[in-house]
Every structure is written in structure tokens, then in C-alpha cells.
Amino acid sequence: MKNGFICLAFTLLLAAGTTHAAPADGGKLSTRATELTRRMAERTKLSEGQYVKVRQLNLRLLTEMAEARKQFASDAAGLDKTLADVQMRYEWDLASILWPKQLAAYDDIKQNFTAASIR
């Protein structure tokens, strides 16, 4: 449960990292997905094919998170469960795209961002 929360917190930090993209419309989500993918590509050295797949995955993640926030606006427990499920699917799909060294670099990024947010 704690690991799921940490992964969710990391994703939310990355998703919220672009301050110019607040509303959840298609163009803004696309911009946020591109920025998130660009940051990941810098640190994990994605190939061109991986970049495209990870960007699509990030766009799906951000879209599902926005939909979940709308759907469960008044149900915090339902929102937490849904976001944890979305995060778990994201991690699973990302693991199928990345090579082992890239996955290790991604895990390191997650830990660094999480540690930085706690301080």
C-alpha cells in the first residue's frame, strides 16, 4: 500500500510539474504528456519508438487521472482506489516498454523525486 502511494505521489508530482497546464482539456493534457515524456527520456535514454509509446502511455495516465478526479470528486476513498489502480496499470505497462537498465533508471528517478518531496 505504501509503495502504491509513493508511486502515485511521484506521478502526481510529475504531472503537476508543468504549471502552465492546469485545466484538463485535450491540448493541455497532450502538452503535459509531452513534457513528462521528455523528462523521462532525458534520464532513461528512450529510443524513438519507446518515446512514442511512453508518450501515449503518459497521455492515457493523465486522461484517466483527470476522469477519475471528475468522477470521484466527492468520494475520497473511491478516488484513492481508482488512482492507485491507474498507477498500477501505468507502472505495469511502462515496465513492458522499458529495458531493464532504463527501468532501473526510472525507479531511481521515482525515489529521488519522492525523497525530494518529503524534505
Image (cartoon, rainbow, N blue to C red):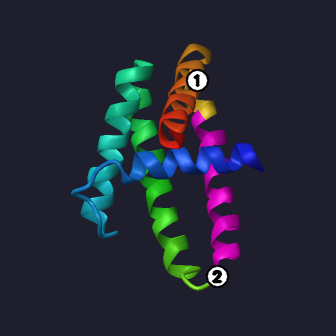
Give the CA separation, mark 2 to mark 1.
33 Å
User: Looking at the picture, how far across and down is residue 75, in whole percent?
Assistant: 64, 82
Identify which residue is drawn at 62% across, 32% down: 95
Q: Which residue is mark 1?
A: 103
- Range of residues picked out in magenta: 75-94
In this rendering, the answer to whether 63 lies above or below 72 is above
Query: Picture coordinates of residue 6 (x, y %)?
Result: 63, 45
Residue for point 26% across, 59% down:
21
Looking at the image, the residue that sits furthest to the bottom is: 74
Closer to viewer: mark 2 or mark 1: 2
Closer-to-camera residue (17/51):
17
Label 2 sits on what residue type? Asp
Residue located at (58% from left, 23% from top): 103
Q: Measuring 72% from the left and 42% from the top, which residue is drawn there? A: 3
Label 2 neighbour load within 10 Å: few <14, some 14-19, many 20+: few
- Left/right placement of residue 18 relative to residue 77 reads left
20 left or right, relative to 14: left
User: What is the residue that sits farthest to the top in this orientation?
Assistant: 101
CB-based contact (under 8 Å), mark 2 and mark 1: no
From the top left corner, tell me how far across and down residue 48 is, in percent: 35, 25
**Residue 7 part of the magenta-drawn span:** no
Q: Quadrant of residue 81?
A: bottom right
Q: Callout 1: helix, strand or loop? A: helix
Residue named by callout 2: 75
Kind of residue indicated by mark 1: Leu
* Disc number for residue 86: none
Placement of 107 over or under 1, stated as above or below: above
